[in-house]
Each structure stands twice: as C-alpha cells, then as structure tokens.
Amino acid sequence: MTSSEPLLTIAVPTYNRAGYLDLCLENLIAQAREHGDTVEVVVSDNASEDGTQSVVGRYRSAWPALRAVRNKENIGSDRNIAQCFALARGRYALIFGDDDVLLPGALGRILAVLKNGEHGVVFLKPYGYDDDFIREHPRTLRTGYTMYTDSERFLRKVHVYCTFISANIINKALAADIDLDRAIGTNLVQVRLVYRAALRAASNVYFRDYMVAAKRNNSGGYDYLRVFVANFNDALEAASADGLSSTVRRAIQRTVIFRHLPYYVMRMRRSDPEFDGDEAHRMLLRHYPGSLLYWLCLYPILKAPLILALPWTWSLIFASRAAAGEMGRMFAFVTSRLRGKAA
C-alpha cells in the first residue's frame, strides 16, 4: 500500500433511494472521518431521478473527501456494482448497499483486522431490520472474530451470505483479474469476487457479532429462484476453477436449502399471484437432483395446503436459527413483526 492509497474503500452503488442513502452515509461518514486517509468512501449514482444528488452534495460539503460519481444513464445494478469495484483505490473494497447501515464502532474494528494481516475476504455478520436498526439489533453472546486458514471452511460458514454485498470486504489484488462481464445479468456479480479472493487467500476472517444492519425485503425486480438457485449454483460451479471442491459446493447447497430458501419460497407462494408451484418444483429439482433435503424442506412448502405449509416453514426457520446459534436474531425478527402489527 502506498502512502496515497487507502487501506479500505467503501463504495456505495445507489439508485433512487435518497432517504436510505442519507442514513447509510450518515453512519459511514461519521466513522470514516475518524480514520483520515486510511478509508475512502465513494458513491456511484446510477442516474437517480430523486433527491440523491442533493444528499450526496450535502455530505460532500461536510466532508470533501467523499468521492462521488454520477452515471449519465442507468447502466443496471450489476454494472454499477462492478463499477464500484473498479473505482475503489483501496487495498480492500467493501461494496456497500445504499439501504444498509454499518453499525457504530464497526469500522475501527474492521481496520484493526485489515492492518494486521493479508486476508482474502473479511465477512461482516449482518442482521435484518424493519424500522429501527438500533432497537431491532439482536442479542448475541458471540463477539470478536475467527480467522480461517482453510478457505473452504470459511466459505461453508458464509454460505449464501456471499451474495450480500455489504457483508463482504474483498482483497482487490486477489480478484482484480476476474472477468465481471460474464456475471452481468445474474444479480450476483459480487459472488465471483468473493469466491476468487477467498479461495486464493492464505486467510479469511469472519466477524462473529453483528456488524451490518440490512433493511429487510427492500430489493426486488428479479426472479428470486432464478437468482438464488440457478445463478447462485452457476457461481458455485464457476468457483470450482478457483479450487472450490464438489464436497463443499454440495454442503453450501444443503445449507441454502435448509437455512435460506424456506422463508423466501413461502413468501413467494403467499405474495406473488403468478407464482407457479409446479414450475418452481421442476426448477428446484433440476438444480438439486437427488437431494433428500429438498424433498424434506422445500417440497412441502410448495405443494402442501397452506394451513400445513405455513407452520412447516416456521418450524424450519426456528430449527435453522437454533442450529446456527441465532435465536437472538429470530427473537428480534418476531418482536419487530409483532410491534409492526400492533402499530
């Protein structure tokens, strides 16, 4: 790292979410300005038509070190994410969602880790929130971080959260040679970066306590099963060229089936009037052939009467949170929903 090169770039791709961006930058810049040239913050505005430029201008006036880029036209979310990675001047890059929040005090802890080793990926554990990210912060007994010298153990631990851009700090040098154009249109550009950097690294880091608050159910405009089943499995397959074993690939798929898909498949069944359970079954079966876990976890959600499928879904969610040691997160989620209904 040269004297003019930041240790960490936090790059925020944004489009028409001025209110969320305001909260995001408020928390990012409050922490970044304490660390001088060690951190840079970049905003890549994808030709927003709301008050995004006003928000960016206000923060640049308060903190001139903030870099801002505005695209002349909307280049799509994938290309904007790839652009953020290219714009980053730091040794490490964190592409951070405009509707997410870096928790107070997190940046100092992150920099301490980055200064004391050469890591491939540093994972920031996230939790979801509905209204107030402070009040909805889950309780956890796990603090600190774990350093993994086995890349595959690390990737099994991260599993589907490699898809969450705000949770993965990437060593640029280890992933700079990847052809991101091949991932454009998948909604998973970041996954290729995470896998390449992690598999090439001597060490990767997993923060055990929560570092990022993510606004729940605030993305869309894509086919969920296409992205998180078909495209994600394609990304896993592509990672085999970087050394991801078939054993670990299958282990990650099992974790996704058990811990991630039940909630979202049920959500689609209940909220999407065009959802076709038979078509979803055929697609899932195609990507998880011979998987007993699919028949146990997901098939009943697709095909059983709703009065039976719904409690089965919540049983799986409860079991998966318990298995992961995340009952605090489960409690915070339920409490938030009950509070919302009461309001």
Image (cartoon, grey):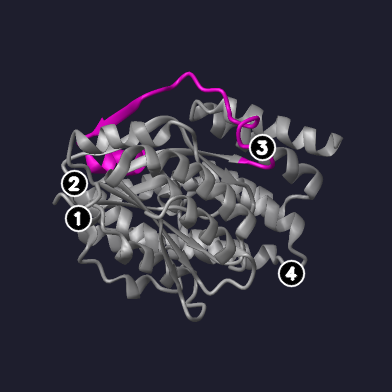
Specify the label residue 174 is tagged with: 1
User: Are the two marked residues, 3 and 4, in contact with CB atoms closer than 8 angstroms?
Assistant: no
Q: Amino acid at mark 2?
A: Ala
Left or right of 179, for residue 310: right
Q: Position of residue 112 (x, y in %)?
A: 27, 32
Specify the label residue 274 is tagged with: 4
Q: CA distance from mark 3 to mark 4?
A: 32 Å
Q: Amino acid at mark 1?
A: Leu
Q: Earlier in the sequence, mark 2 or mark 3?
A: 3
Q: Position of residue 258 (x, y in %)?
A: 53, 42
- Disc 2 element: loop
Q: For residue 145: magenta? A: yes
Residue 106 at least partly seen: yes
Q: CA distance from mark 2 to mark 3?
A: 36 Å
Q: CA distance from mark 2 to mark 4?
A: 44 Å
Q: CA distance from mark 1 to mark 2?
A: 7 Å
Circle 1 packing at 10 Å, graded few (<14), some (14-19), many (20+), is: many
Circle 2 packing at 10 Å, graded few (<14), some (14-19), many (20+), is: some
Q: Position of residue 39 (x, y in %)?
A: 32, 46
Up the image or down, 73 lies above or below 173; here it is below
Residue hosting label 3: 132
Q: Which residues lie in the magenta part? A: 129-157
Q: To which quarter of the image does residue 178 belong?
A: bottom left
Q: For residue 153: magenta? A: yes
Q: Earlier in the sequence, mark 3 or mark 4?
A: 3
User: Are the two marked residues, 1 and 2, in contact with CB atoms closer than 8 angstroms?
Assistant: yes
Residue hosting label 2: 201
| Near-viewer residue (318 or 111) | 111
Q: Amino acid at mark 3?
A: Asp
Q: Earlier in the sequence, mark 2 or mark 4?
A: 2
